[in-house]
Image: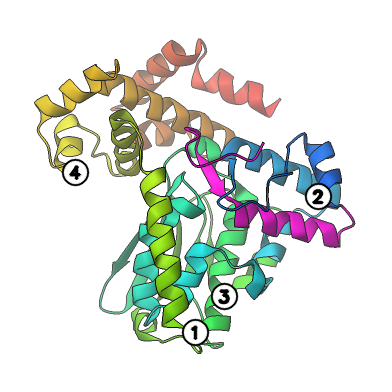
Amino acid sequence: MVVCLNNSLPSIGGSSVLALVTLLESYGFNQNRVSTISGIDLSSLDQQDSRLPLDQYKTLWKTALSITNNPALGLELGQIINTSKIGLVGHIVFNSQNMGEGLNEYIRLFSIVNEAISLTLETDQQYAYLRFIHLSPEYYCISDMERTMALFLHRGKAVFDKNLKWESVDFQHPQPTYHDAYKKVFDCPIRFNQNYCQVIFPRKYLKITPKQRNPYVGSAALQYANNILKKLLRRSYSDKVKTLITQSISTGKTDVDYIAEQLNTSRQTLYRKLKAEDVSFQDLLEEVRFSSAKEQLKETNLSLSEIAFSLGFSDLSAFSRAFKRWSGETPKSYRENIQG
């Protein structure tokens, strides 16, 4: 069912769900029918601040792909520019002074859009790198990432400059059978099986101003978004630690001292706060490793050794022992069972 803000499950903003439901209507499936087929109650979707748990959102996408028989549905949705369907964060971005300011707010507020993704923006002398880091790999949804990346490009063209062109785009998932559709949508080099999703574009774009800007709308939207963000961030201390571990695992920086430093605290304080929530740092580290391992075994063609090293294990045997302890089977047998 559609949830309210105090639900503890990772969730996605109602505007993203509504955009998909609206597209399905053009395929002949109204909201009630989609609810019946998917088993997801969408009756409260139009309510203010409505959200949907991410596991249900993935189920909704699975249903959408099945009933439309269109594997590239995410790319199609990402190319639809409907100003009446722009969400709260979108209004803030498109009423910012320039793209750089808008992206900084986009990054800060992105948990309103999707709680399982964290964004970073890095720059060098020539390019800007906008990265989408999945904090909970089990919620990675290929179709939604296709939609998100396509929407970022096409809304940018509509709002800032029709001549915008990305340098390249990266995706975490394997190359799909319909990869030719990606080339038509993005018109730039595309890489799959990457550590995170990423858009690379000329740094000079950060100074581009919106074609039409209403600072009053932007200011009102920002004030409201900040209130929502405060409610979403009321999470346990262990959630914060787990999020940082997930963000850092691909870099190998998952030791307790590094995580404590990111929280501006000491190792002893971190241990004490986690103990108060009846959880240990090692518990959280293993939970993140297990979740990421399952996702990589299921969704990528990486070798077992590559997966082991990506999770911070010194060798394959150590990874295999840990995975068997977590699941009762070896990573090899787990992958074979999934693949059928």
Residue at image coords 50%, 16%: 330
Could you tell me how far apart the alpha carbons at marks 1 and 3 are, in whole angstroms? 8 Å
Span highlighted in magenta in the image: 1-29
Placement of 107 over or under 230, stated as above or below: below
Say which element carries label 4: helix
Whether residue 175 is visible: no
According to the picture, the residue beneath numbered tag 1 turns out to be 160
User: Which amino acid is tagged 4?
Assistant: Gln
Residue at image coords 54%, 39%: 139
Whether residue 5 is visible: yes
Q: Which mark is residue 155?
A: 3
The tag earlier along the polypeptide, 2 or 1, is 2
Residue at image coords 26%, 73%: 124
User: Which amino acid is tagged 3?
Assistant: Arg
Say which element carries label 2: helix
Say which element carries label 1: loop
Depth check, front residue: 145 or 102: 102
Q: Quadrant of residue 333?
A: top right
Placement of 127 over or under 238, stated as above or below: below
Could you tell me how far apart the alpha carbons at marks 2 and 1 are, in whole angstroms? 33 Å
